[in-house]
Amino acid sequence: MGEEAKCRVLCRLNNIDAQQIKQFASKIDDDYRVHMVIDNLPSATKYVDETDPQKPRLIYDLGFPLGFTGTAQTPGLKPGAAYLNNHLAFTIKYHRDASYEGSRIIGFEVEPYSVAHTYPKPWGRYTIPTSCPVTAQSPPLVLAEGTTEVLFTYDVTWEYSPIKWASRWD
């Protein structure tokens, strides 16, 4: 509770074959979403709805997309190619009150990224990716012929919230 984390390695899938790449790409094409739960709260991805530029508003969508498909409108992406979201930035919101000891989790946001991770060779148990810290400008991980491994990483940020635990679903 309360421990920040930056670019921690969750796992490394190596020796991925063409069939596995095809399965990931098919699920991305079908708009699969990943759902996680912490303290009985579902993860949510936060978006800004700018339909009315005078009144932008926050929208939360349950879970996060497994990946996305490249378009010609996005520079640097291959149109039609599948990109896997393999880095997750978690923001865990908590509330502390004098009426109880400790903190309570009241929100669980996730921001997914696709990152073509790099790291010093050979891979070892304590290897730290050189592609960190992850930003929106990090090169994305395209799932294509020749992709042989995926490194899954995450960040955790804790954020105080004035919302009380009893109102966390509101």
Image: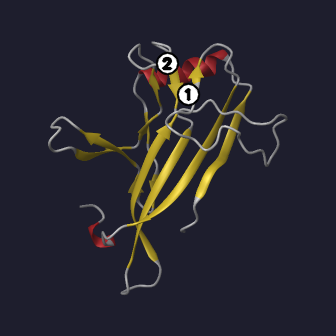
Q: Is residue 55 left or right of residue 137?
A: left
Q: As rendered, which of 52 and 168 lies closer to the eye? A: 52
Q: In which image quadrant can residue 123 be found?
A: top right
Q: Amino acid at mark 1?
A: Pro
| Distance of label 1 from label 2 (alpha carbons) | 8 Å
Discs 1, 2 touching: Cβ within 8 Å: yes
Quarter of the figure with the N terminus: bottom right
Looking at marks 1 and 2 on the same chain, the residue that comes earlier in the sequence is marked by 2
Rendering coords of residue 94 (x, y %): 41, 68
42 vs 143: above or below: below
The residue carrying mark 2 is 77
Within 10 angstroms of label 2, few (less than 14), some, or many (20 or more) residues?
A: some
Mark seen at residue 168 = none
112 vs 157: above or below: above
Q: Is residue 148 left or right of residue 34?
A: right
Rendering coords of residue 10 (x, y %): 65, 46
Q: In which image quadrant can residue 54 be found?
A: top left
Give the residue at x 15% y 37%. Answer: 52
Within 10 angstroms of label 1, few (less than 14), some, or many (20 or more) residues?
A: some
58 vs 19: above or below: below
Q: As rendered, which of 131 and 97 lies closer to the eye? A: 131
Seen as rendered, the residue at the extreme bottom is 99
Q: As rendered, which of 111 and 99 lies closer to the eye? A: 111
Rendering coords of residue 39 (x, y %): 45, 63
Rendering coords of residue 79 (x, y %): 45, 12
The residue carrying mark 1 is 140
3 vs 119: above or below: below
